Image (cartoon, rainbow, N blue to C red):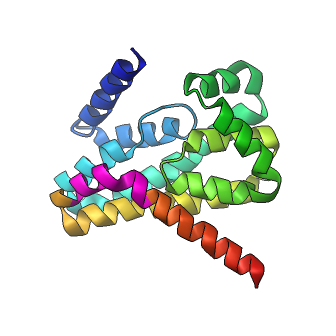
Amino acid sequence: MIARFLRALYEQTLALSRHRRAGWALAFVSFIESSFFPIPPDVMLIPMVLAARLKAWRYAVICTLASVLGALLGYAIGFVFWENIGQPIVAFYNAEAAFDRFVVFYDDWGIWIVLAAAISFLPFKVATIASGVSGLALAPFLVASLIGRAIRFFGIAGLVYYFGPNIQKFIDRYFNILSLIFVAVLVLAVLLLGAL
């Protein structure tokens, strides 16, 4: 039932990439995905860049900025509306355990968790809500969100721009693995810097 609902939502989101107001739709999906929407904006970004490669960087900017604004909404949900809105959102994604792990590590690793979630397949919405619940400082939260989302969306736009349609299949097939590798390298770099 939920899988069918998510599949239909995915198809509708993909269809928005062909709409005449696709840029606005991309901004909207990027905004809401950072706080509660289950379908990532990559679903729209990839076909939009394939259709208009010269607009690749513009689309990456739209995704990045709208996503960071949406991250503020996620933060507000955690900070102000946790009981009424945040808990039901986390429960809908069956992410209570992941959320609890996020909160436990936030004291020492909050910024790095936000950065990793902003870049990878990890649920960014859970990280934004957890940031609000734990009271993570807003300025570092925004900086980590901006850097992470820019890496992700400019990276995807760049791959599609330079490698065309073939890269879409590669990204679709290996996105989770590529994200894990990138996050592992990021964690290793942080640990090495901490050891110096």
The quarter of the rendered structure image containing the C terminus is bottom right
Q: Is residue 142 something that shows in the picture?
A: no
Q: Residue 137 at x, y = what percent?
A: 80, 53
Q: Residue at x 58, y 57 (%)?
A: 116
Q: Residue 186 at x, y = what percent?
A: 58, 68
Q: Residue at x 58, y 26 (%)?
A: 94
**Furthest residue in direction bottom, as rendered:** 196
- 151 to the left or right of 175: right
Q: Toward the viewer: 113 or 66?
A: 113
- 89 to the left or right of 165: right
**Which segment is the magenta one?**
167-178
The quarter of the rendered structure image containing the N terminus is top left
Tell me: residue 36, above or below residue 183: above
Q: Quadrant of residue 159?
A: bottom left
Q: Majority secondary structure of the magenta segment? A: helix
Q: Is residue 184 something that shows in the picture?
A: yes
